[in-house]
Image (tube, helix red, strand yellow):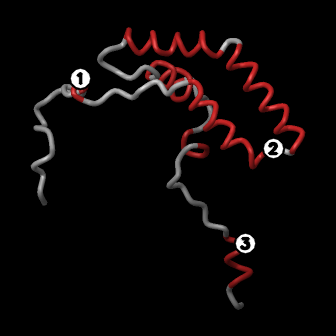
Amino acid sequence: EDSSDMEPASLPLFAKQSEVPRLPVPPLDHTMEVFLRSARPHASDSEWEELQRKVRDFVKGAGPELQKRLEQRKAELPNTSWFIKDWNDLAYLSYRDSVVWNVSYYLQFQDELADAMRSPT
């Protein structure tokens, strides 16, 4: 097995963190475009019109200030990701549902009833 691209085990965790390219803060207009494109299949025509209006209002209202805050956060955290705190606190650490049942993609259940209905007895 070729392990030439592996770091020596003696290095501490995150020793090379500053060498990892930082994620950009996507431009607000791009974020809104991707959001609308992903939301369209899930919205009725009336919902779609309302959603487009709300996005326009957001871009003219709070959007630019919130975008500026994200860019400031990125500038204040030169050695890590600009969303690491939110990810760790909100999406990871404060998630209170059972990880095994609600998050694990590898967990499977045996459907004994379906198996019994398929097998000849």
Q: Is residue 30 left or right of residue 17?
A: right
Q: Nearer the viewer, mark 3 or mark 2?
A: 2
Instruction: Give the residue displayed 51% in from the left and 20% down from the top.
Output: 86
User: Label 1 near label 3: C-beta < 8 Å?
Assistant: no
Q: Amino acid at mark 1?
A: Ser
User: Residue 93, image x and y in percent?
Assistant: 51, 25
Instruction: Residue under label 2, please give it.
Output: 43
The quadrant of the picture occupied by the C terminus is: bottom right
Horizontal relation, residue 4 to residue 74: left or right: left
Q: Choose top left, top right, bottom left or bottom right for residue 53.
A: top right
- Which tag, 1 or 2, sits closer to the chain's start? 1
Q: Please rate how many residues cluster around mark 2, counting C-alpha atoms within 10 Å: few if below 14, some from 14 to 19, many from 20.
A: some
The percent coordinates of residue 64 (x first, y second) are 60, 13
> Residue 113's mark?
3
Amino acid type for the residue under numbered disc 3: Leu
Give the left or right position of residue 87, taking residue 101 as reference.
left
In front: mark 3 or mark 1? 1
Residue at point 15%, 44% (across, down): 6
